[in-house]
Image (cartoon, rainbow, N blue to C red):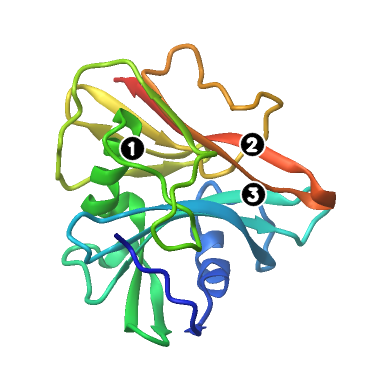
């Protein structure tokens, strides 16, 4: 169970992301740095209790369109060997000390728990409350058993998001730019074997919803 500490974090997560996002091929902003607000998301628990796992929705408010990005992040108490290229930055946590923050698509712990969520072996947890499931998160899967697997992911980024192969001849697509849909809950594409979807607060008290990840055959 992940314990949520309500304490200071410097720099903030949105400050780290504001520096990192413009380097991604799926970034939709212009040359100026984005102005980000933390809009929502959910967490997963690391069974070994060592790695923090968060799927954050960060909204760029610098334009009227308000682009919402999905940032899967992991938080570690020491560097992840071989993942220097995936480091978003470091921050000082008021309770836990220095934390290394990674693009979670490169972290085998996040990927293993995400597949467990898609298959129904793990629960999505509330982003800011300890030991509380997030019941708005929906998932589906219609294929053979996925695991448990702990493998080194090899993701590739393009203008559509992040993609990487999954054992069993599958491909996982992480939708980095979230496209709100009218359905509640959001429905996956017809050719998807599995998916994860949820919602987050929009402007003027609205509730936005989208598919966050899609699992397909290669």
* Picture coordinates of residue 66, whole percent (x, y): 75, 51
- What residue is pinned by disc 3? 68
- What residue is pinned by disc 1? 117
Quadrant housing the C terminus: top left
* Picture coordinates of residue 56, whole percent (x, y): 51, 55
Above or below, 94 against 68 in this view is: below
- Neighbor class of circle 2 (other Cα within 10 Å; few <14, some 14-19, many 20+) is many
Residue drawn at the location 54% of the way across and 46% of the way down? 26
Q: Earlier in the sequence, mark 1 or mark 3?
A: 3
Q: Is residue 154 visible?
A: no
Residue 33 figure quarter: bottom right
Above or below, 182 against 179 in this view is: above
* Picture coordinates of residue 208, whole percent (x, y): 69, 40
Q: Seen from this angle, which residue lies furthest top?
A: 190
With 144 as the anchor, is 139 left or right in this view? right
- What residue is pinned by disc 2? 209
Residue drawn at the location 60% of the way across and 34% of the way down? 210
């Amino acid at each position: 169970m992940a314990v949520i500490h309500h304490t200071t974090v410097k720099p903030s997560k949105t400050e780290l992301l504001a520096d990192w996002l413009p380097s991604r091929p799926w970034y939709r902003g212009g040359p100026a740095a984005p102005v980000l607000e933390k809009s929502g998301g959910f967490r997963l628990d690391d069974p070994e209790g060592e790695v923090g796992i968060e799927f954050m929705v960060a909204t760029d408010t610098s334009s009227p369109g308000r682009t919402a990005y999905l940032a899967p992040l992991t938080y570690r108490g020491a560097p992840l060997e071989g993942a220097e290229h995936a480091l978003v930055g470091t921050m000082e946590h008021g309770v836990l000390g220095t934390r290394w923050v990674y693009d979670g698509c490169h972290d085998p712990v996040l990927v293993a728990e995400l597949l467990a969520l898609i298959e129904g072996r793990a629960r999505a947890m509330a982003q800011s409350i300890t030991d509380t499931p997030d019941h708005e998160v929906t998932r589906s899967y219609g294929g053979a058993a996925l695991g448990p697997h702990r493998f080194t992911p090899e993701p590739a980024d393009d203008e559509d998001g992040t993609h990487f192969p999954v054992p069993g001849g599958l491909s996982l697509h992480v939708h980095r730019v979230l496209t709100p849909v009218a359905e509640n809950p959001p429905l996956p594409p017809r050719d998807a074997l599995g998916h994860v979807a949820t919602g987050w607060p929009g402007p003027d008290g609205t509730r936005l919803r989208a598919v966050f990840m899609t699992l397909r055959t290669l």
